[in-house]
Image (cartoon, helix red, strand yellow):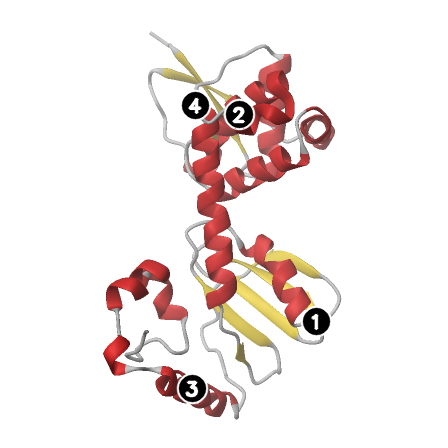
Amino acid sequence: MISKLSYLYDGSFEGLLTAVWEAYYAKEDPSEIIWEGVSHPNLLSSTKMIYTDANKADRVYRAVEEKISHAALRRIFYIYLSGEPESGIIVLNYLRIGFRLGAAVDDYHAEPTVLKSEKLYNKVAMEKHRQAGLIRFKRLESGVFYSKIDPDHNVIALLAPHFAARMPSEYWILHDAGRGIAVFYDKNDWVVRNLETPEDIVLKEEEETYQEMWKAYYRHLSIESRKNMSLKKRMMPVRYWKNLIEEGIELWS
């Protein structure tokens, strides 16, 4: 017996907004909205492919901003970037409540869907904040600055404005190796493009000297009696350490 309806979409934010539009205007109640690239057949569900429609997505985008709030628009974008399997249906259910309550929706913490949306939003926002402080660029032989990261969530587009402001006169690449995508900055604008992990990265000759200076700086900061590894792991998750230039240096205070 078929009891559930699953929406499949192409994984884009516009595709997710199109799915929201479809649920409203087709008066359907999907149990999940998932990316077709990671979906798994379920014999108890029927599936419906949602084809991205820019006009429908734009109508939903403007409706969220006008009838709920700009904060709600930011929240659903962060939830989408979380990449969590349930993110699509959380966005739909959150917007259903939001279109009924308006901007007050975010005050309804007792509502399970609002609470889930807040938790996912905060997880993505926290990772964006942490990554902004932990990213280390290396200068390549070509003069381009390069940094590889492996975030839990798809946050590189959120980080791009931060580094465009900090490094406006440099060419740089911020590479999310796990997702095979990168931000490319050309001193004026940034774009997100696919990028596989380069087989050989050649550092600029003096880059190794700079890295040694950076490590020496960290060693100088180290105070043996104030080392606290549990605090370090809590403030800087271990999964981020592998991409740090100073990784391996025994310090923390």
Q: In this view, does 214 lie to the left or right of 191?
A: left
The x and y percentages for residue 129 are 50, 57
Q: Mark 4 points at which residue?
A: 110
Q: Where is mark 2, residue-wise?
A: 94
Circles 2, 1 touching at the beta carbon (< 8 Å): no
Q: Which of marks 3 and 4 is in front?
A: 4
| Residue that extends furthest to the front in the rendered view of this protein | 225
What residue sits right under mark 3 in the picture? 217
Secondary structure type for disc 3: helix
| Whole-number angstrom distance, CA of label 2 to CA of label 4 | 13 Å
Separation (CA) of disc 4 from disc 1: 44 Å
How far apart in space, not on screen, are marks 3 and 4 (Cα)? 48 Å
Disc ID at residue 38: none
User: Is 114 drawn above or below residue 158 in the view shown?
Assistant: above
Residue, disc 1: 168
Under mark 4, the amino acid is Ala
Residue name at image x 35 percent, y 86 percent = 219
Nearest to the observer: residue 59 or residue 35: 59
- Circle 4: element type: loop
Is label 2 in a helix, a strand or a loop? helix
Task: State left or right for residue 97 relative to residue 116.
Answer: right
- Distance of mark 3 from mark 1, alpha carbons? 25 Å
Whole-angstrom CA distance, mark 2 to mark 1, is: 37 Å
- First in residue order: circle 2 vs circle 4: 2
Q: Distance between the residues labelled 3 and 2?
A: 47 Å
Label 2 packing within 10 angstroms: few (<14), some (14-19), many (20+): many
Q: Residue at x 54, y 73 (%)?
A: 146
Residues marked 3 and 1 touching at CB (< 8 Å):
no
The amino acid sitting under disc 2 is: Tyr
Q: Which of marks 2 and 1 is nearer the N terminus?
A: 2
Can you give x and y, in whole percent of width and height, for residue 107 in the image? 53, 27
Q: Is residue 178 above or below residue 63?
A: below
